[in-house]
Amino acid sequence: MLKVAKFGGSSSASGEQLKKVADIIKSDLDKKYIVVSAPGKRFGEDNKITDLLYLCHAHITYSVPFDQVYKMIVDRYSEIVKDLGIEFDLDGELNEIKEKLGKNISVDYLVSRGEYLNAKILAKYLGYKFVDAKDIVFFKMDGTLDEEKTSVVMRKVLNQAGNAVIPGFYGTGALGDIKTFSRGGSDITGAIVSMVMDADVYENWTDVSGFMMADPRIIDNPKRIRSITYRELRELSYMGAKVLHDEAIYPVRNANIPINIKNTNNPEDPGTMIINEREKLDTDLPITGIAGRKDFTVIGLQKFYMNSEVGFVRKLLSTLEMFDITFEHIPSGIDTVSIVIDNENLNGKLEKLLSEIERVCKPDALNVYKNIALLAVVGQNMAFTTGVSAKIFNSLGENDINIRMIDQGSSEMNIIVGVAEKDFEKAIKSIYAAFNK
């Protein structure tokens, strides 16, 4: 069996954490390729190394002294090397970086040094080969992954390397410069390595034991999700349940490689397994998880005989496109249609948008509902279990929570419920309790 293991910032935040990482790796010889992030926070008020590197670049850009920030980075790595008790030429590595700290230094190069140094240090501690991501991950001119070149080069290099540690988050751009993925991109690097090397499982190690059925900040000690499909994960992640970078899903899902989310601080816990499809459906617990977000606005249109007017919805969506506004959901009836929009996308455009909708669509009534929160109840089993919707709506009604909007796709993978923001936490608690009596 071949495993690719990615360790996040919390897993590699200190020398003590990296010792745990090393123990996990050495206890399982199937873990052949290791992807590592930059050191994260050791405690609540601590700084992530990536944040310090971004700050350092900002200081350089605006001609602000950066010595104090840079010293924080140096001290952090010095402490890690000391705690691990290894002979590592940290001064040489840091001097090479410092020589490039001029106004022309690229932000991608500088922030990528967090992963670069951490991977080099871990490789030294493990006695594994260090493989620089710039030599095996390549981007096209438009900034997207050059999958063909990456696959050919990575497969050749890693097959020759044996056990290897690879820094996440970055690769080489089309012009030969260092280019990073979006923030949290080490997850993507691990997924790409898993896909290219045809891993049996992609382990993603963090500081939580996988996904929970609901937000633990709202529900006290919620049930853990032991398995979840990629489609369910997509639905929950979209509504705010984030453990994994969204773009890390595509490479492994297409290759039918499961992802195992595990806890570095509790390695014996099985965590959550993310799979393509479940072999067995559990009708005793038809929902997989509950997630939600606030800050939505709903625009409701009413027009008699709307269903008979050819192109009505097209005109409405064209109006949104004119203002460069995306929508989240669009529930409708015979003579009504509602557009759910994230407030961030409205960004001061609401009044002009409403005027244009009035002009183009000529609705009989146009209403705006602000301060709306959306809840997603997600589960592959819902389609095969009767009474799920009734249980959701009854739980809300029994707790005096008014439903402002309902949306459900034909796949019956999820049910979206809109409530007033003031009822958000109470609604999640109500639905969770209904399915966990």
Image: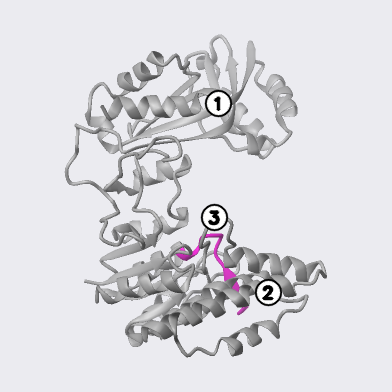
The reply to whether the C-beta atoms of the residues labelled 2 and 3 are less than 8 Å apart is: no
Q: Which mark is residue 421?
A: 1
Residue most toward the left? 280
Taking the spot 58% from the left edge, 19% from the top edge, the residue there is 300
State whether residue 406 appears in this view.
yes
What's under tag 2, amino acid-wise?
Answer: Tyr
Q: Is residue 74 left or right of residue 16?
A: right
Which element type, helix, strand or loop, lies under badge 2?
Answer: helix
* Whole-percent x, y for residue 49 in the image: 58, 67
* Whole-percent x, y for residue 245 in the image: 46, 55
Work out whether 319 lies above or below 91: above
Instruction: Report the front residue among 422 and 44.
Output: 44
Q: Is residue 241 left or right of residue 312?
A: left
Q: Which mark is residue 70?
A: 2
Asked if residue 181 is among those painted magenta in the image, a careful observer would answer yes
Q: Is residue 60 left or right of residue 327?
A: right
What's under tag 3, amino acid-wise?
Answer: Gly
Of callouts 2 and 1, the N-terminal one: 2
> Alpha carbon of mark 2 to alpha carbon of mark 3: how far?
21 Å
> Alpha carbon of mark 3 to alpha carbon of mark 1: how far?
28 Å
Q: Which mark is residue 44?
A: 3
Q: Which mark is residue 64?
A: none
Q: Which dot, 2 or 1, sits closer to the camera?
A: 2
User: Label 2: how many residues lie within 10 Å, few (<14), some (14-19) or many (20+)?
Assistant: some
